[in-house]
Image: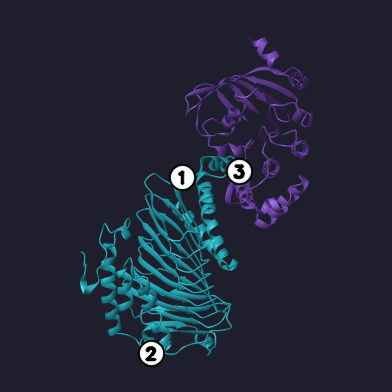
């Protein structure tokens, strides 16, 4: 489904290499966790997958469903089913959350050659999803993420995921800034989206989130490449011993 | 071809501080030609039968007037004598009504110092076209003043005179800019505890060159709220000159402009606080694309002794390309020592994070830019009271923004 080979990336602004040969294969239905210390390139990997400007890729490839996506615009990748849940969801004053969701939903439908949905049908759909995720209908009326609490922002990301139904979900530190209860709620939202046809990549610092979202495969990223992969027990090992063991083994 | 000083009107010249960013000579010709056109039209004037009387227009959801060069049109079946609204065509009133004589040329002349505004004086002296409106009580329905197609293709002078009596309430919506050139003045007197809500929707003619002035006097505990929406026309100068001579008066002036291409729109606002506890707001936002120019000159003037004045001024522009420009001169001139006044001006491009966020959800780049531009502009609509009007304006704005991108 997703195949990343020898991916290198440079942050254009600072001419700084961030990714130094990432290899990753994700199959439908799998949940992968990517862990790693600060500055190891985890978030950059998520940006490159979703198509953010400002990075140069001098080497390597990303194919999604056998198509090279590196040259595609972010909206084209979204139309293929790629979704990034942001670490810091952007506040957009003046744009209503519901309008945003409906525009995105219909844009994806249109790109896939499907029929757009009416405003009233969409309202029903979103209300149902919001209720399932325990999201207050109030959030739908407000501008996108504007004045939302940390927990509300993250839940709004999960709501978008539930409504847009992507085939690949990348969650960039979705646990950061959440208290235990909010993390539990968000995790339940993610678990509800587990599906044999959908792959999920969870990027996190801590094993804590992985207690709620059980990964099939855990990767450790250090200094721009994946240095170790294993089962869920690898995350526990990191929780107990930190990254130091892994780092010293590398040296 | 400049006609400076003709007829004793010392029209402003390039380089005058009050015309720092918009070249005033572009309007000299319009004013002169407008006068000639109008006099010529008057010679062959049709019978102004439709506007011969004062009309009472109570009891409608909307009260609609259509202004033409020589007449004022409206639905005659709705005409009734009223104790709350008086309306008529300016040319037929002149010299015959003391309430009009108390406003026409008077509100304007009170604020000609320290900056003379000869274009407005010229319009007031020569214009024979305009709506005279006197609200004597609370009028629930908005008055729509539509500028008819009869003006198309020539230059015109329009002078509207508006009076809102003590405790009265009036909502006036001016719609249209069908002229290739217009010099226009509204003179407004809002008497104590009166309320005047004004909305100008100047869209639809990309060739229009408009010079618009609104002079207002807002008395004790009275309120004026004026919002303007300008579409993509060649050249617009929109001036608000407002004085608050008494205590507890309130003035909100706001506006939105969407421009694309070789167009220029200038909002120039001057609010003078002369009483105690006055409140004023100036809120303007513009979206500029393909080399469009936006101008904002705003001043809050607080007289000595006008304590507890609360003044606020904000002008912001979103530049969608590198050729567009936003030229601003925000000013505070304060001679009292116990006031709260602030001003801010910002200018920037589309936020790349927001753009990426929307695009990552499948929204195309152009649509995302439209959404962000619209979101930026829509916040100004909070200044408008009527939800019905806001809804209409939102639709209009969406079209305008989509056309500009």
On what subunit does the disc labeled 2 rest? B
N-terminal-most mark, 1 or 2: 2
* Residue A67 location (% of width, % of height): 58, 30
Identify which residue, A168 or B244, lies in the foreground: B244
Output the letter for the chain in purple.
A
The chain holding disc 1 is B
When asked about the image quadrant of residue B235, the answer is bottom left
Q: Secondary structure at mark 2?
A: loop
Q: Residues within 10 Å of mark 3 (few under 14, many from 20)?
A: few
Q: Read off the residue under disc 1.
A: B349
Classify mark 3: helix, strand or loop. loop
Q: Nearer the viewer, residue B342 or A31?
A: B342
Q: Give the residue at mark 2.
A: B96
| Vertical side of B184 occupied by A80: above or below | above
Evaluate whether residue A84 shows in this view. Answer: yes
Q: Residues within 10 Å of mark 2 (few under 14, many from 20)?
A: few
CA gap, disc 2 and disc 3: 69 Å
Q: Nearer the viewer, mark 2 or mark 3?
A: 2
Q: Colour of chain B?
A: cyan
Give the answer, above or below, for where B281 lies relative to A216. Answer: below
The colour scheme is by chain
Which numbered dot is residue A112? 3
Q: In the rendered view, would you say B67 is above or below A104? A: below
Where does the image place residue A233, in percent across and percent down from the top left?
78, 20
Determine the residue positioned at 53% across, 44% down: B364
Q: Are marks 2 and 3 in contact (CB under 8 Å)?
A: no
Residue drawn at (39%, 65%) of the image: B239
Q: For the residue carrying disc 1, how many other residues have a C-alpha within 10 Å: few (<14), some (14-19), or many (20+)?
A: some
């Amino acid at each position: 489904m997703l195949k990343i080979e020898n991916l290198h990336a440079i942050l254009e602004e600072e001419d700084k290499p961030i990714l130094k040969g990432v290899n990753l294969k994700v199959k439908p239905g799998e949940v992968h966790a990517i862990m790693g210390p600060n500055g190891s390139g985890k978030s950059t990997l998520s940006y490159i997958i979703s198509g953010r400007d400002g990075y140069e890729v001098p080497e390597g490839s990303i194919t999604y469903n056998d198509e090279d996506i590196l040259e595609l615009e972010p909206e084209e990748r979204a139309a293929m089913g790629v979704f990034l849940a942001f670490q810091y969801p952007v506040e957009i004053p003046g744009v209503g959350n519901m309008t945003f969701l409906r525009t995105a939903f219909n844009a994806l439908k249109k790109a896939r050659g499907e029929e757009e949905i009416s405003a009233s049908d969409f309202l029903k759909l979103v209300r149902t999803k919001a209720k399932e995720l325990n999201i207050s209908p109030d959030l739908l009326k407000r501008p996108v993420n504007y004045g939302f609490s940390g927990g509300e922002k993250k839940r709004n990301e999960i709501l978008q995921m539930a409504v847009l139904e992507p085939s690949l979900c990348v969650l960039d530190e979705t646990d950061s800034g959440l208290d235990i209860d909010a993390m539990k709620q968000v995790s339940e939202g993610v678990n509800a989206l587990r599906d044999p046809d959908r792959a999920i990549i969870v990027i996190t610092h801590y094993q804590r989130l992985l207690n709620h979202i059980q990964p099939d495969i855990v990767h450790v990223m250090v200094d721009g490449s994946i240095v170790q992969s294993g089962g869920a027990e690898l995350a526990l090992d990191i929780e107990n011993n930190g990254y130091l063991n892994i780092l010293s083994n590398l040296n | 071809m400049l006609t400076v000083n003709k007829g004793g009107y010392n029209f402003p010249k390039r380089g005058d501080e009050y015309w720092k960013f918009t070249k005033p000579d572009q309007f000299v010709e319009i004013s002169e030609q407008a006068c000639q056109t109008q006099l010529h039209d008057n010679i062959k004037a049709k019978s102004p039968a439709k506007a011969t009387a004062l009309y009472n227009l109570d009891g409608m959801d909307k009260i609609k007037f259509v202004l033409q060069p020589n007449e004022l049109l409206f639905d005659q079946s709705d005409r009734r004598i009223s104790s709350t609204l008086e309306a008529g065509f300016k040319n037929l009133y002149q010299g015959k009504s003391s309430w009009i004589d108390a406003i026409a040329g008077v509100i304007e002349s009170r604020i000609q110092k320290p900056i003379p505004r000869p274009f407005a004086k010229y319009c007031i002296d020569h214009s024979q076209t305009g709506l005279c409106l006197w609200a004597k009580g609370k009028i629930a329905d908005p008055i729509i003043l539509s500028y008819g197609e009869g003006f198309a293709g020539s230059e015109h002078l329009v002078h509207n005179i508006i009076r809102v009596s003590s405790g009265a309430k009036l909502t006036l919506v001016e719609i249209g800019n069908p002229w290739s050139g217009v010099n226009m003045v509204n003179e407004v007197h809002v008497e104590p505890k009166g309320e005047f809500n004004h909305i100008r929707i100047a869209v639809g003619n990309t060739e229009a060159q408009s010079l618009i002035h609104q002079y207002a006097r807002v008395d004790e505990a009275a309120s004026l709220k004026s919002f303007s929406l300008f579409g993509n026309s060649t050249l617009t100068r929109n001036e608000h000159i407002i004085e608050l001579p008494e205590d507890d008066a309130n003035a909100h002036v706001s506006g939105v402009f969407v421009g694309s291409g070789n167009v220029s729109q200038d909002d120039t606002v001057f609010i003078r606080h002369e009483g105690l506890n006055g409140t004023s707001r100036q809120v303007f936002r513009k979206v500029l694309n393909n080399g469009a120019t936006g101008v904002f000159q705003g001043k809050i003037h607080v007289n000595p002794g006008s304590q507890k004045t609360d003044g606020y001024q904000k002008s912001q522009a979103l530049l969608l390309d590198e050729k567009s420009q936003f030229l601003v001169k925000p000013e505070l001139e304060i001679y009292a020592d116990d006031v709260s006044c602030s001003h801010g001006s910002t200018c920037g491009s589309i936020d790349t994070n927001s753009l990426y966020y929307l695009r990552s959800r499948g929204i195309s780049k152009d649509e995302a830019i439209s959404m962000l531009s619209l979101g930026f502009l829509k916040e100004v609509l909070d200044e408008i009271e009527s939800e019905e009007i806001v809804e209409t304006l939102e639709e209009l704005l969406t079209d305008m923004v989509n056309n500009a991108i």
